[in-house]
Amino acid sequence: MKWTWRDTIAIAAITFVVSAFFFRLFWPVPQLIVTPDFGRSDAWSFSFTSKYILAQNLKQGVLPLWSRQLGDGFPVLAEGQIGTFFLPNLILFRLFDVVTAYNLALTLTIATLGVGMYLWLRVQNLSRVVSLFIAISFAGSGIVIPHLTHIALLQGFTLLPAIMAITYMWAKKRTWLWALLFSLTASQQLLAGFVQASFITLLFAAAYYLFLIRHEKKKWPLICQCAVAGIGMAILSAIQLFPSMEFLKNISAGQGFLPLNASYYSFPFADILTLIHPFIFGSARDGSHMINNHYAGNIFWENNAFIGTLPLVLFAVSLFIKKRRADGNRFWFFLITAAVALLLMAGRWSPIYLLYSFWPFNLFRVPARFIWIFAAAILLVAAYAADKILQSARSRLLTVLITSVLFLLNIYQIGSLWWNYHLIEPASVWLTRPQLATSLTPDNRVATILQVAIYSEEFNKFGWLHPDFYHLMRNTIDPNGNVIWNIQHHDIAAGRLLKRPGIADSLIYADIKFDDNTHIATVSAFAQKLFTVMGIDSIISPAVLENTSFMPIASVSANTQTLTLYHNPQAVPHAYLATHIALATTVEEVSKRLADDAFIPGKTVLLESTVSARLTGEGTVTMTKQTDREELLEVDATGSHILVDNDTYYPGWHAYVDGVETPIFPANIRYRAIIVPEGHHVVRFIYTPTMFVFGAWVSGISYVVFIAGACLLSFSERRNESKVQPRASRRRRNHDR
């Protein structure tokens, strides 16, 4: 491939088309994609709000290591999908307001995807017009546009074509410089925060690399390069990888999902018909896309394989085109790749479903996401067919005219299909404080219950045709939107949940019964006690709560739906002193101890092991400072106490009493506690995660070594080229003589 001004124009064309699609998000007023999802809007509750947290922290000059407002305390950086160290995120969310930065991030992501695909085709010496056509088809496909609600997923997969292009050049050049470039790009994909995208990409890249070097006799030097590249990718991303590995140890499925869960959201073979038309089975937008059991598959935005009519026709034509040997080899490689990807994305419906019982396939859900490889492989085959047809054309002018018309028709088809798909509304509407939130303060801790059934009922019937319903549901203060209003929420919207909070919540929600017909709910005395122990003083529900001590204090209605805010006057404070211990080492014992009348919230604490302290007397606790990563408390006690801090128990937290570190132990299943002796004391809790600090050092040193190594390799290659060129010139002169 020789780069010319025509390639620059092609990349500018990709950028222009993508920018034209997203322009309405910026002008005439800033807008947001707030498309709903099952039980909530991933676009709002997860994608936008996670980047909102990132922006707020970066603008304050700190990293989002921990959020006390989510899930009673949550390690947002370690969970990963916030994408803290992904370079575009660091730049955009530091420099721009959060709405502009978020919309720029989406635009840049899709443009990068298109440009990456263009480069991948061009390094294979396919024509510019074919490369441009396929690049825009990929960027506007059914696997991309419906996923605009999932920015972390897109930012992960957006580098797939670029990594494939680098893999191609690495296999052809076989130099260490390309191996280092692969490490850098692959590490950025990991830092985007969607590890499944990296896993799928690396599988594809490994198969592609082996295919490209299949005729190489001495493979050991290349295998060594691969090993170094893999290690380089890991250590460059260690600043994220190490905290995430620690996070995995503290979640329910840290060792991998059970086969049934690992195959959730598989791709039903019938959905292959979406290649013909994206809405062949209906649209999620108007509720016509029927979902019987979304865990089994049949999810519009996960299973839509549409790549455009013309690419599909070209794929079919390629099956009948006579090919040269080289073209035939790569045709068969991508055809086989598409077939394997289809089997993988079919998950539980596939004859190789047992694969999801084994590591590393059981680390992830949604096998349907192998559709990214499936679609890319089909588009590659279509590109080879289009390039072959253009090469055999006799009239260059006629070819240019026909390809231009088909190219414009393809853009028109993509635009007309997807332009009105998403729910896009002014950002000011969604950033305005909801009515129920005006009755809450930063000191309140909120739990939202029973909203998922109401939300899903509307979503399944009407999609997002009735935006007013979703405006009302903003009043549920559903996580993670609560962060925008500076309100603490008991729950969190995250890809993976911590084990301890999961156990505690399962005990609560198992004792809440809801009648679909009357919209009346009963909260058992046991569940009410758990709400109290966990310091939840505010409950929002679309159901009427009967026979509880919770008091309704505010409500908001629209049409026939009402949301009510209840107050729990018995909720314990964020920090308190306990003088009685209930010991429990199993979930059954936990339930028994909590249900016991002897367990008094605010006085009794549930522990998992005995403590060597005699608890007596009375005392008071005063919170003097509270941030995401630090708490300062003053304790006055007439005897020894257990200080309970209703913030999540998690590695990396340290406690100091009068400057002397003291052990932290788990309390009330999910929170943390320390022993405080008699007298007046200053207690400090601070979050300094060792794995993050260690990862930061490893990544920092690795980048220095990486830059130095890249400079040395580049200098060495240039020097070798300068030696080769004079020799070649002398040989040509001698030949002329």
Image (spheres, rainbow, N blue to C red):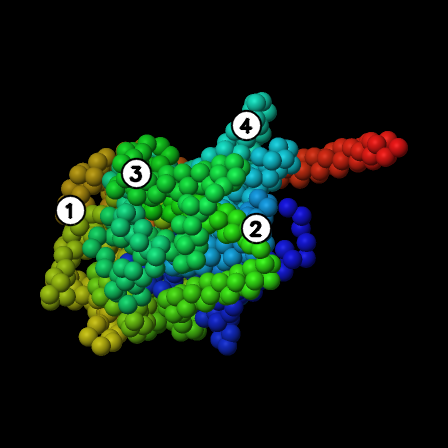
Tell me if residue 444 can be seen. no
Q: What crowding class fits label 1: few (fewer than 14 Cα within 10 Å), some (14-19), or many (20 or more)?
A: some
Q: Which comes before the other along the chain, label 3 or label 1?
A: 3
Camera-side residue: 483 or 662? Answer: 483
For the residues labelled 2 and 1, the Cα–Cα distance comes to: 78 Å
Residue occupying the point 40% across, 42% down: 338
Which residue type does callout 4 highlight? Answer: His
Camera-side residue: 706 or 283? Answer: 283
Which residue type does callout 2 highlight? Answer: Gln
Residue 215 is tagged as 4
Q: Mark 3 and 2 residues: CB-CB less than 8 Å, in contact?
A: no
Which residue type does callout 3 highlight? Answer: Phe
For the residues labelled 4 and 2, the Cα–Cα distance comes to: 27 Å
Q: Circle 1 is placed at which residue position?
A: 595
Q: Position of residue 10 (x, y in %)?
A: 60, 58
Q: Which comes before the other along the chain, label 4 or label 1?
A: 4
The quarter of the displayed image where residue 181 is located: top right
Quarter holding the C terminus?
top right
Q: Which comes before the other along the chain, label 3 or label 4?
A: 4
Camera-side residue: 137 or 296? Answer: 137
Q: Mark 4 and 1 residues: CB-CB less than 8 Å, in contact?
A: no
Q: What crowding class fits label 4: few (fewer than 14 Cα within 10 Å), some (14-19), or many (20 or more)?
A: few
